[in-house]
Amino acid sequence: MKVEGRARLLGDHINTDYIISSRRKRDSLDPQVLRAFLLEAVDPDFAATVRPGDLLVAGQNFGCGSAMEVAATVVVGAGIRAVLAKSFARTYFRNAVNNGLLPVICDTASIGEGDHLAVQLGDGLSVRNETAKRTIEAAPLSPIVRTIVQAGGLVPYIREHGGFPNQGANL
């Protein structure tokens, strides 16, 4: 799986209410409706400038705050297939995986707004900043996480595989 796109820079501690305001989900939970309000608390014009294929690039603790799943589904609904960050809130990381959104843990300091990035997910995970002609080391993902993301999320994975391989008592 290869994801390529334009880097859209954000800062540290982008919480789920910044990603999509809690008040917006009173009207709808449909990601196609909510995408118009993506990151409006950070930049009211952000959603209007997003193109399918863009990649979110953040600092530390992306997705902190509440565990609302819609904060991941709205990103997917906007056509964004990956988020690169120095670190993720654990619940956001899991919600991203479960919804087929690729969470990439890497040092994002050298990425500039608009840089063209290529993320390759296979047996490993690699990030290439094509604009700067530099490779960025990314934290590896477990085999099951890679497989779930490649399937498009948890529901498509279960439909395809019928369940999880026997993981023993450590599942």
Image (cartoon, rainbow, N blue to C red):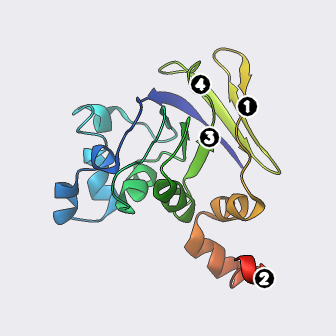
Relative to 3, say whether 156 is above or below: below
Q: CA distance from mark 2 to mark 3?
A: 28 Å
Question: Which comes before the other along the chain, label 2 or label 3?
Answer: 3
| Picture residue at 67% right of the left edge, 33% below the top | 118
Question: For residue 168, which numbered disc appears in the image?
Answer: 2
Q: For the residue carrying disc 4, how many other residues have a C-alpha within 10 Å: few (<14), some (14-19), or many (20+)? A: many
Question: Which comes before the other along the chain, label 1 or label 3?
Answer: 3
Q: Is residue 17 left or right of residue 62?
A: left
> Which residue is under mark 1?
137
Q: CA distance from mark 4 to mark 3?
A: 17 Å
Disc 4 marks which amino acid? His
Q: Is residue 96 left or right of residue 39?
A: right
> Which residue is under mark 4?
116
| Picture residue at 34% right of the left edge, 31% below the top | 49
Q: CA distance from mark 4 to mark 1?
A: 16 Å
Disc 1 marks which amino acid? Glu
- Extreme residue in the right direction: 123
Relative to 68, say whether 19 is above or below: above
Element marked by disc 2: helix
Q: For the residue carrying disc 3, how many other residues have a C-alpha within 10 Å: few (<14), some (14-19), or many (20+)? A: many
Does the CB distance between marks 2 and 1 fall below 8 Å?
A: no
Residue 12 screen position, x and y as percent: 42, 32
Q: Is residue 154 left or right of residue 54?
A: right
Residue 106 screen position, x and y as percent: 63, 34
From the viewer's perspective, is the residue at label 2 or at label 3 nearer? 2
Element marked by disc 3: strand
Question: For residue 105, which numbered disc appears in the image?
Answer: 3
| Picture residue at 57% right of the left edge, 59% below the top | 97
Disc 3 marks which amino acid? Ile
Question: Which comes before the other along the chain, label 2 or label 1?
Answer: 1
